[in-house]
Amino acid sequence: MTAAPFSIRAFAQDRAAASAAEFALVLPLLLLLILGTIDIGLYAWQINQAEKATQTGARWAVATDMIASGLQNYSFASAGGIPQGTVVGVSAFPGVTCQSGGTSVSCTCAAGGSCAFPLTASNTAFTALVTRMKQIDGHITASNVVVTYGWSGLGFAGDPNGPDVAPLTTVSLRNMNYQPISTLVFGVQVPLPTFAYTLTMEDGSGTVSN
C-alpha cells in the first residue's frame, strides 16, 4: 500500500482541525474579556470598600482622641489671649494637617497660617484610626491616611469641658491602587481616586466609636 501523492490543492482545502485552530485564536480574546469583566467588578468593589473605610474613619476621628493632641488641652483664653467665652477666630486656628511620616505622625499648620498652639501629634490616636479603617479595607496603610482639622467657627475660648475648637475633621485616603487580574503578570496597577469625608468634631476624647 503506497501513500497518496502530496497535493498543494488538497492540503489547502483540508478542513481537519480547523475548529481547534479557530478556537486557539479566539481563546486569548475570550479570556481577556472574562478577566476584564471580573476586574471591573473588583475595581468597583475596592472603591466601595475604600469609600466606606473613609466614612468610618471620619466617624472614629471625631468621637475619639484628637490626633492633633496639642489642641486637646490648649486654652486659647489663658494661653492664646482670646477673651473667655468667645469664638476662636480663623487667624488663631487656621487649621492643622496630620499624617504619617514613616515611623511617627506629625502635624503641620495650614499653609499661610500661624499656629501658636503646640503642633504635637498622638501616634496612639492615629494608629487606632488606621486600625479601624483597615477593618473595612485591609489594603490601607498608615501612609494612605491624612487627617485635617479645619476651622468651623464652633467652640469657644476657655471651654472647661473639652477642646476650645470643634473643627471640621476630614479624613482622606490617598495613593491607593488596584491590581487587576488581567495585568497581574506585568505588575501594572490602576490608581484609585482620592477619598475624603468630613464631620464636625464631637468631644475629641475617647477610645471607642460606633
Image (tube, rainbow, N blue to C red):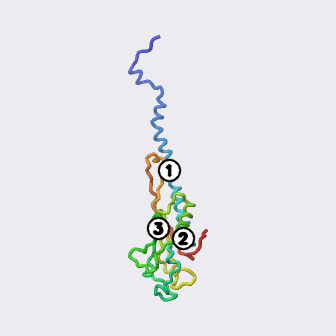
Disc with the residue nearer the chain's start (2 vs 1): 1
Furthest toward the top, the residue is 1
| Dot 3 and dot 2 residues touching (CB under 8 Å) | no
Please state the total of marks drawn on the protein image.
3
Question: Tag 1: residue type?
Answer: Asp
Q: Residue at x 46, y 72 (%)?
A: 107
Q: Which residue is mark 3?
A: 99
Disc with the residue nearer the chain's start (3 vs 1): 1
- Could you tell me which secondary element the residue under label 1 belongs to? helix
Foreground label between 3 and 2: 3
Furthest toward the front, the residue is 103
- Taking depth in this image into account, of 34 and 98 the one nearest to the observer is 98
**Label 1 Cα crowd, 10 Å radius (few <14 / some 14-19 / many 20+):** some
In three-dimensional space, the C-alpha distance between marks 2 and 1, rounded to whole angstroms, equals 32 Å
Foreground label between 2 and 1: 2
Q: Which residue is mark 2?
A: 61
The numbered mark at residue 39 is: 1
On screen, residue 191 above or below 160: above
Q: How far across and how far down the image is residue 41, in percent?
A: 52, 52
- Could you tell me which secondary element the residue under label 3 belongs to? strand
On screen, residue 55 above or below 69: above
Q: How far across and how far down the image is residue 97, in percent?
A: 45, 71
Disc with the residue nearer the chain's start (3 vs 2): 2
Question: Tag 2: residue type?
Answer: Ala
Question: Tag 3: residue type?
Answer: Gln
Q: Residue at x 48, y 31 (%)?
A: 20
- Could you tell me which secondary element the residue under label 2 belongs to? helix
On screen, residue 157 above or below 63: below
Q: How far across and how far down the image is residue 29, in percent?
A: 46, 41
